[in-house]
Image (cartoon, rainbow, N blue to C red):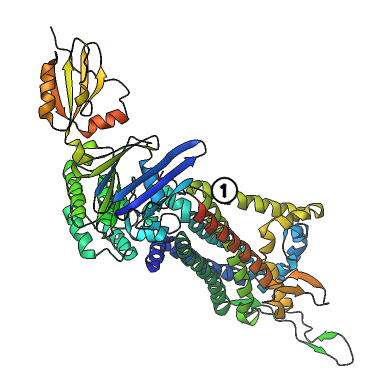
Amino acid sequence: MFHALIKKYWSESWLLWSACLFILPLFCWMRIWIVAQFELSRLEPLLEQLKPFEKFSPVPVSQFLTYAGSIAMTFDEPVVILCVLVWAVARGSDVVSGEIHRGTMEMLLAQPITRRGMMLAHAIVSMSGLAFLCISVWVGIFFGIETLSIRETPPAPSIQLSWLPVEIPLSVSGASREPVWVPLRDRVDSGFFLPPALNLFGFAYFVLGLSVLFSAMDKYRWRTIGIVIGIYILQFMLYLLGKSTPSTSWALNFTFFSAYRPDDIVRVIVEQPQFAWAWLHWDKSGEFVGLGPLGYSMLLIACGATFHLLGVYYFHRRDLPAPL
Amino acid sequence: MSGNSEAILETRELCKSYGRFLALDRCSLAVQRGEVFGLLGPNGAGKSTLLRTLMGFLKPTSGQGRILDFDCQRQSVEVRRVTAYLPGDARLFRQMRGRDCLAFFQSMRPDVSKQRYLELAERLELNLDRRVVFMSTGMRQKLAIVAVMSSQTPLIILDEPTANLDPTIRGEVLQLVREAKQQGQTVIFSSHVLSEIEEVCDEVVLLRKGVLAKRLRLSDLQQSHRLFARTCGRCEIPTELRAQVQIVRHSENDIVVDLHGDLQPLMRWVCLQSWSQVRIEAHGLDSVYQQVHPPLTPQPLFTKTNG
């Protein structure tokens, strides 16, 4: 019986899921290919021009000139965000208000299944679908790192004398050095991007849980989608407000965007690999910084799960309106 | 609940209100095993609200309902395990083919056999290879009927099952209801169509504004008649006939009388009256319905003829 429900939800969602699954790894691979086209060290002069916008950035802009930093930006790409959000909102809004809106809820609940069972079957399909999408992002990054090479200009040969703290260049001709191809995997570890992938899952699960909650309270799917998108935009505006000036930084405490920080997570992992899966984070001087990569992801997942459970609770108690 | 051992379904003082609007008002009824029980009433009378409350879709404001000793609220899953329910506006999963849809319902209910639903689909001339989204309203209704009627549950609830169906299929559905009764299943049949209720039901309740306004057995109805006549004076009913004769309407020129029981002794009294243009009709459900729900515009008893 439960298996039949899962099959039903899967048959309703496989097309969207397949489309996202096709796009995400391909896009991630392509983005890394684009990153690999540039010799990032040559872009350093641009750094000064980006400084005024650094306050809007989750990490120092200098990180974007590292391969790890620029690959981490994949998680901020609109295509990636859009794909996981479309999945989260589409599936989350469908569970109750979607079935009521289509008029199929009565025939479904006329069967001997509990409302909780129905929600659980839906959650299994939605969450595992989301998990695979996030994994597919990482898989795209992994294949990008494993298969692509970058051009690097090797440093000029030099010699360091043991009694002098300076390097003495050996070339005196001043002839330009030829760039060489270096496998990207020699510069970046694909494992760095697993914690950000979990962070992406937490981010999308937050939206999925929110969608389920509003779906459980509503009878029109379009209204559920509208409310969730409205909240999302409001949260994003709070994030921008919080980032823009120190006096409005309080707003960052009221937006879930503050917990979505794949760039920062990669920065922490590069600088302190021992904190890759840490709940809390201390800097190199031993000072407590805040939540660690795992902490942020779990915070988002916990919020999403709370919304999800509230949705189940509300659906269990509510009246089902007649088909519209 | 009253311990009516023969009742498969019982409600006691069941109420459902939406704010100030009382959709169901202290509804108490019992449905006996193995009968076809009709629910009759106009739109908004509370038929679907009653059925949806029994299925656990709506939480009652007060009172309770039981099906086969299972509480409709607290044991809703058990209730739905022993009940097959066809909603008033049955809609199915649009992306599925008819065959997949029935297979889905079969997997949800162990008592449904594939052979049975294929047989029913053939009887109702249903194309199972078509996707639900491409089916006409009538075909979707037939598909839902097949899904529900192929179940072997002790209780079947049909909320306006013949809506959107052509007369042939409508007759076939009524036949399925009769067959379900023969197999010992109890059927609750909600409808607007009086002739259908008369045709298949053993007992019927009429709802009006959420209240159970009248309850009668169809077998009793067959012994009732209605008399229409022209009259020019007042009519007095003898004391010994008052139990069988009831004046429904008496104007200056017309009279309408309900006659209950054997007609032979009553006809002697009728012959003694100074009435003309006497017409006697079998007392159908229609006249009972009109007692409970008077027509918005009074109907003339006799149509005027030229000259």
Vertical side of A297 occupied by B3: above or below: above
Query: What residue is rendered at 48% in x and 58% in y?
Result: A91
Vertical side of A34 occupied by B52: above or below: above
Percent x, y of residue A139: 53, 74
Asked whether, in this view, residue B92 is left or right of residue B34, the answer is right
Query: What residue is rendered at 51% in x and 36% in y?
Result: B20
Percent x, y of residue B210: 40, 37
Q: Residues within 10 Å of mark 1 (few under 14, many from 20)?
A: some
Query: Quick check: can you spot residue B164?
Result: no
Percent x, y of residue B145: 26, 52
Q: B150 and B121: which one is in front? A: B150
Vertical side of A15 occupied by B211: above or below: above
Asked whether, in this view, residue B201 is left or right of residue A266, the answer is left
Query: Quick check: can you spot residue A160?
Result: yes
Q: Mark 1 belongs to which amino acid? A: Ile
Q: A61 and B232: which one is in front? A: B232
Say which quadrant the C terminus of chain B sits in.
Answer: top left
For this orientation, the residue located farthest to the front is: B240
Q: Which residue is mark 1?
A: A227
Q: Determine whether the residue tagged by mark 1 lies in a helix, strand or loop.
A: helix
For this orientation, the residue located farthest to the top is: B307
Asked whether, in this view, residue A33 is left or right of residue B93, the answer is right
For this orientation, the residue located farthest to the right is: A163
**Res A297 quadrant in image:** bottom right
Asked whether, in this view, residue A198 is left or right of residue B165, the answer is right
Percent x, y of residue A262: 66, 67
Q: A82 and A140: which one is in front? A: A82
User: Mark 1, chain letter?
Assistant: A
